[in-house]
Image: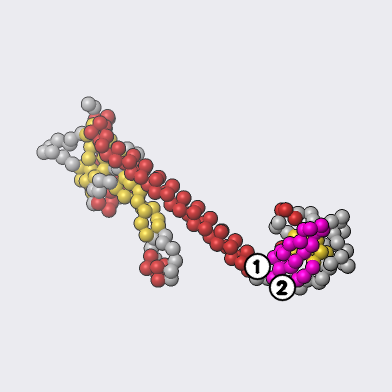
Amino acid sequence: MGRGNGWCILRTGSAATLRLAATLAEAGIEAWTPRRTVKRDAPGKRRRLAMGQRRVLVEVELAILPGFVFARADRLLDIIRAGALTYGPHPRFTLLQVGDRVPVVAEEQVAGLRKAEADAVEAIEGERQAEQRADERRARAERLGSERARRKALRQERRQFDHGEQVTVDDMPALSGMVGTVIEGRGTSARIHFGGALTMEVEAWRVRPSGVQSGNTLTRDAA
């Protein structure tokens, strides 16, 4: 196998692994190191917990094989020059050698690392989807909680109704468009007659005055 089809191996500090692959690529040398993304607590975790706030996670990219970077073997001379630079964009690295020979790793020999990287991508995507579902469930619960609180506050609303007052009812589709007459006001509710045998007690917040006269509306003297 020719050098152009394989990789030579570079060694660097664990913390510099991803940066070395990036700086080599920026210099025009194809370089690769398998990586994975994990979720970790965002800075300020203790303060958030002390304040009773929700846990916040951030994504962090890590090398699967810390300290090792693969670079295209057909760029060997450029790699050697880059490694010899005292100052430059690259983290310090050495070229892996066996005696005087630079071993070349075939593409099929890194297949296991390629799969590990693909599995890591699948794993983080599963975590992202699970987190999104959890966020959606939390948002629904918050909306329901807010709606329950709103309804509770509305049910406690007290209003003054006059006997015989003409009213309509909101948020009750069965009574939509009907005009009724107040028989009795009870602060947080009212008994309303809608004509015939239909008399209902309705929560006060649903009731609003109406100037509409209709065939099913009693006169003020009807009650």
Residue 82 against residue 207 in the figure, above or below = above
* Residue 118 visible, this angle: yes
Given the current orientation, which residue lies at the most extreme left position?
99
Q: Residue at x 73, y 62 (%)?
A: 200
Residue 134 against residue 153 in the figure, above or below = above
Badge 2: few (under 14), some or many (20 or more) residues near its Cα, within 10 Å? some
In three-dimensional space, the C-alpha distance between marks 2 and 1, rounded to whole angstroms, equals 10 Å
Q: Residue at x 82, y 71 (%)?
A: 163
Q: Nearer the viewer, residue 215 or 98?
A: 215
Sequence-wise first label, 2 or 1: 1
Instruction: Say the numbered circle drawn on residue 11.
Output: none
Q: Nearer the viewer, residue 59 or 139?
A: 139
Q: Secondary structure at mark 2?
A: loop
Residue 72 against residue 20 in the figure, above or below = above
Instruction: Say the numbered circle drawn on residue 187.
Output: 2
Given the current orientation, which residue lies at the most extreme top position?
1
Query: Which stretch is magenta?
Result: 183-205
| Residue labelled with disc 1 | 155
Q: Amino acid at mark 1?
A: Arg
Q: Residue at x 25, y 31 (%)?
A: 108
